[in-house]
Image (cartoon, rainbow, N blue to C red):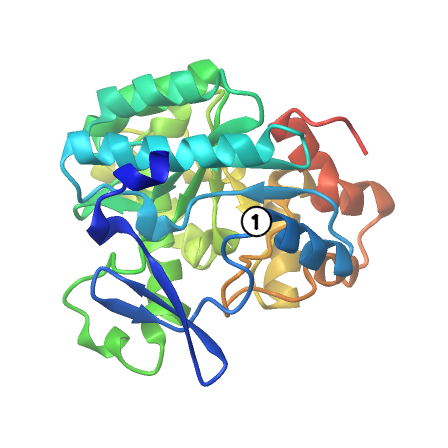
């Protein structure tokens, strides 16, 4: 019954072309969705086949309706959140919801309500809203609510967050390079804006291993040392914030993943797969085990951190 209230232009269509799954959405034709996209039981079966026994579901980032009017956005978020809550009700999966982040006060209210629903553990948000990074003061009411409710906030690139870069329109660079760059920019913005210092219990999870954030951490540190404007909002320095973030393990590079664990600590890295998209990984647990970490560190990444953050029984 709720599905009938979804505005037509916010309904993805899934078709098959030459045996390939194609998603049509708001004028875009996407072939990047390569796995199961709608059936939770099929998703669980696919995960079990690679040794994963619990999933954290989140909305498709394109269905986080920050471009919509507020009333429409509330409808779209509500419908998704109802569906995710039903999927998570029996405990077989956990879920993050969607909130209308174009209005931070309303998003804060919706997040507080969401956190009262069994199985719902926080929200997924786009890395920018109408080109504005998440460290902007307009989002402070949302971050305050996220800290107060102990919500996990998953920051994911919008897939179109770097306008004016025509090179990214070719050779799949909008995904392989543009997506992690957008996460890098907004994470650096959050760190230098003092958001993590202002809200010391805030829990933010960055997609794709934080993008390119750790390639520039030395430059952020240097800027903090030599430029007063870089240190004005975050006097403690960027490393404090960068080590406070949580990161998924999806780097596609063992050396990068090992470096991330070494810098942020195993307690701040979570197993990530990016399913069902083509830029995900088919063997997330195997990639973590290949690092050769000690058993305690390995178990934190494989499930211990998720259990703590999502309120699950310890494995």
248 lies above or below 165: above
Q: Quadrant of residue 280?
A: bottom right
Q: Which residue of the protein is positioned furthest toward the right in this rendering?
A: 295
Mark 1, residue position: 248
Residue 88 x, y percent position in the rendering? 59, 33
Residue found 14% across the figure and 67% down from its top: 164
Residue 190 x, y percent position in the rendering? 33, 37
Query: Which of the pair 305/99 is nearer the observer?
Result: 99
Q: Is residue 292 left or right of residue 229?
A: right
Query: Which of the pair 118/211 is nearer the observer?
Result: 118
Q: Is residue 176 left or right of residue 300?
A: left
Is residue 38 visible to the viewer in this orientation of the structure? yes
Query: Which of the pair 151/293 is nearer the observer?
Result: 151
Residue 310 x, y percent position in the rendering? 61, 29
Disc 1 secondary structure class: strand
Residue found 38% across the figure and 22% down from its top: 111
Q: Residues within 10 Å of mark 1 (few under 14, many from 20)?
A: many
Residue found 48% across the figure and 43% down from its top: 58
212 lies above or below 246: below
Q: Is residue 39 left or right of residue 133?
A: right
């Amino acid at each position: 019954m709720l599905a009938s209230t979804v505005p037509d232009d916010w309904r993805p269509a899934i078709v098959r072309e030459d045996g390939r799954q194609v998603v049509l959405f708001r004028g875009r034709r996407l072939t990047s969705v390569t796995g199961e996209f709608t059936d939770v039981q099929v998703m669980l079966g696919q995960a079990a086949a690679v040794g994963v026994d619990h999933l954290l579901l989140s909305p498709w980032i394109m269905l986080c309706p920050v471009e919509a009017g507020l009333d429409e956005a509330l409808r779209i978020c509500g419908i998704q959140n109802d569906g995710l809550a039903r999927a998570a009700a029996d405990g077989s999966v956990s879920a993050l919801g969607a909130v209308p982040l174009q209005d931070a006060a309303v998003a804060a209210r919706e997040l507080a309500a969401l956190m009262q629903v069994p199985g719902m553990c926080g929200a997924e948000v786009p890395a920018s809203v109408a080109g504005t990074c998440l460290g902007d003061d307009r989002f402070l009411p949302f971050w305050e609510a996220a800290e107060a409710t102990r919500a996990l906030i998953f920051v994911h690139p919008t897939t179109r967050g770097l306008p004016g870069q025509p090179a990214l329109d070719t050779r799949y660079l909008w995904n392989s390079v543009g997506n992690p760059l957008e996460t890098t920019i907004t994470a650096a913005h959050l760190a230098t804006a003092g958001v993590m210092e202002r809200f010391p219990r805030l829990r933010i999870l960055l997609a794709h291993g934080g993008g390119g954030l750790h390639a520039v951490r030395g430059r952020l540190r240097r800027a903090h040392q030599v430029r007063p404007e870089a240190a004005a909002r975050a006097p403690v320095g960027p490393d404090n914030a960068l080590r406070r973030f949580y990161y998924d393990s999806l780097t596609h590079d063992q050396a990068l993943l090992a470096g991330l664990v070494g810098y942020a600590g195993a307690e701040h890295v979570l197993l990530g797969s990016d399913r069902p998209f083509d830029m995900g990984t088919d063997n997330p647990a195997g990639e973590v085990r290949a690092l050769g970490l000690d058993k305690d560190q390995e178990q934190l990444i494989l499930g211990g951190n998720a259990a703590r953050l999502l309120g699950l029984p310890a494995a």
